[in-house]
Amino acid sequence: MVRSARILSVGAFMLGAVPLLVTGSAASLGQVRAAETDAPVPSGKPQVEKSSPEKPSDGEKPATGEPGKDNKAKKAQNSPVPVAPDAIHYQTILLPTSDAAVDSGMKASSQLLALEKSHLVGPYALAGRIRDDYERLQGALRSQGFYAGQISIVVSARGRHMDGRDPLLAAFLLNLPHGTLVKITVSAKLGPQFHISRILILPPPKPASKSKMAQKSGATQAVSSPVLPPGPPRLEKLTPEEEKAFGLKIGQPAIAGDIIAARERLAAFLQEEGYGLSDVSAPQGILQSAQHGLEVRIFLKRGPKLVIGPISLEGLKHVHPSYVRMRMNLKEGQLYQPSVIDQAQLNLSDTGLFSSVTVRPAPPIIRISPDRSLVKGVDQAMPLQFTFKPGKRYRISGDIGYSTDLGGRAGVKWLDRNLFGNGEQLRLAAIATGLGGTAEQGLGYDIYADFNKPDFMARNRTLNLRIEALRQLLYSYRQTAFFVRGGVAQPIGRNWNVSGSALLEQERINQFHHTRDYFIASLPLEATFDNTDRSNPIEPPTHGVRAALGVTPSLSMEHRTAFYLPLTAEASTYLDLHHLGISPPGRSIIALRATVGTIQGVSSVWNVPPDQRLYAGGPATVRGFRWQGVGPHWKHTKYAIGGTSMDAGTVEYRQRIMKSFGTALFVDAGQVGEHSTPGEGKVRVGYGGGVRYFTPIGPIRLDVAFPMNRPRRGDRWELYIGLGEVF
């Protein structure tokens, strides 16, 4: 998906009109023009200097600038290569300097160090590799402002030492006995760190005529460079806000990354201020060796301030344009800001209705009347064009899972993503449940129709309507029920979501040989918090917190009228051991979970319908115990009564192995009580482990759990298979 709203792209970063040199992780401002006086930039764009020798050594191909080809080159570089008969084994020693950033840059830049084990070469190629490293390592010094620094490379073998630039180096290496280990010692003399001595923000210069220097040197193609007019330069004055965004100060170290970042901040700030045609040139530098200073020059073109012009929509087929315009949250006449346009594109992509959404400026700039502009004094507008490719409207998927307590489940789901042309979703599902299992007494079903309408009466508010038929034959009770529910959900800010609904339930329950009918009306209310930043609900969290608080006022009628108030709270957090320096990011995770629930307003658990009571056991609470296997039981049987209070907790360690596999170890504990105060009842503890296989949609999970204090007639172990982590 293309996501770019900037009208003009910015070219390569420059210093002294020479492109930015990137040396491993260190960005260098490259070759700079030495000047003892503040002379203007000479006419003619200088030729790009290449490290010597110009041809790549060791048979290595240079980067093409094309991602596909460069990736292939990297793979080829990392893959085993045949060792030449005259290959020389060597060891590279990088002596530390007084600057850690320089040390890191030198380590990342050195081809000697990077290739010493994987690409052994002969004497001539090794001599070329050594010569090439001078410029690479010099770039690491320049990147931190040490423009007067010097690199020394000493080659040592059999008691002899030779400078890396010595013309006789290749012959020296050629005459070494086979198998001799060569030591290559790299050191750096930093010298003084240069500081920024002057910052010039200049208007766009006029292009120069053909470079006489290029003509004299026999260049086949004339190049040009910005030329300053004679006399004092005319400066572009920045506003206080622009100065703050720019952030570059005279006197600070002339570190390439800081100078480049300042240019990027200024360019981004201008774009966000509506200067969609603004152009901030790559930084240029004039090196002032005597003062150990660097003059930074940036050419700035603001252009006119713009608002958004007419917005055209191309490629819509089954989606109403009115819904698209409402969903993008973008209006004609508002300030032209790339971040706002990108967000509009993201809003449309998140609907799931399109396989791709692209947006681009549609010049020319037009003038609009003042009443159409939402920005006072701005009447120039840039039209926008959104182009859509429709996504798949229908989807059929399967639902499958297995655990030893609830047995197997298998079913099919059908989804229409755009029922009425405004992103409405209709999902139909039919699932068979209770296919075996120690907590089941027979085959059940779950059949439902679920309807979602996005942006219901307000942006981002979702209306949900659901009808459902359910039958489950558990050892605790046998239930046949019909549900009708309607509600809305509304996100609040980035991490919060609140929802409320009305639920009507007609059910028949048989428990302990007594059959009763219930009609229950309830108002489920819930608030959730999630800052784990997952791209989809099945993706395992690696950091952050998830929490949910639910309140469900309920009235049970028909069999016995009773009002009761279930309250539930659950929180989980995820600790990445990378922050302790133990493992790479996202590889080793400690996950913690706590759950508590209570039912208020009843004097006895028997006044609450069986399916409304609190239970524990199973993957949602305590693994190692069958579903509803924790808590009070009927006369020492395996039939659970349920309770009016429950609390449980989990500690789980998750470890990724290689790319597609993982393991988990966990301990769960929980209890269910017959009173409304949590913390009562017999504490049950389960433990176990499992394996994970990571797929593009989420991990396939297989867990085995055992009870530490198994109750009478309890299962000896439980097996769980599913998609995604338990929490």
Image (cartoon, rainbow, N blue to C red):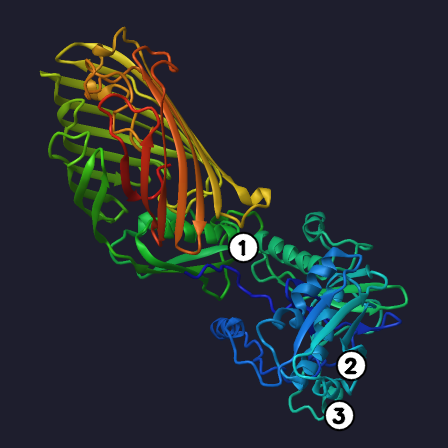
Q: Nearer the viewer, mark 1 or mark 3?
A: 3
Crowding at label 1, few (<14), some or many (≥20) Cα neighbours within 10 Å?
Answer: many
Pick whichever, 80 or 568, lies toward us. 80
Q: Which mark is residue 379?
A: 1
Crowding at label 2, few (<14), some or many (≥20) Cα neighbours within 10 Å?
Answer: some
Q: Quadrant of residue 180?
A: bottom right
Confirm or deny contact between disc 2 and disc 1 (CB under 8 A): no
Label 1 is placed on what type of residue?
Asp
Q: Report, in whole angstroms, how far the alpha carbon at label 1 lies from the one at label 3.
A: 50 Å
Q: Which mark is residue 165?
A: 2
Q: Report, in whole angstroms, how far the alpha carbon at label 2 lies from the one at label 3.
A: 30 Å
Pick whichever, 373 or 515, lies toward us. 515
Q: Which mark is residue 216?
A: 3
Q: Is residue 315 left or right of residue 667?
A: left
Label 2 is placed on what type of residue?
Arg
Q: Residue 317 in the image: x percent, y percent?
A: 26, 58
Among the two numbered marks 1 and 3 on one chain, the one whose residue lies closer to the N terminus: 3
Q: Quadrant of residue 278?
A: bottom right
Q: Is residue 346 left or right of residue 566?
A: right
Among the two numbered marks 2 and 1 on one chain, the one whose residue lies closer to the N terminus: 2
Q: Which mark is residue 234?
A: none
Q: Residue 262 in the image: x percent, y percent?
A: 68, 56
Compared to residue 527, the image places residue 183 above or below, namely below
Name the image quarter holding the N terminus: bottom left
Q: Nearer the viewer, mark 2 or mark 3?
A: 2
Q: Is residue 583 left or right of residue 200?
A: left
Pick whichever, 297 or 134, lies toward us. 134
Q: Residue furthest right?
A: 290
Q: Residue at x 44, y 42 (%)?
A: 654
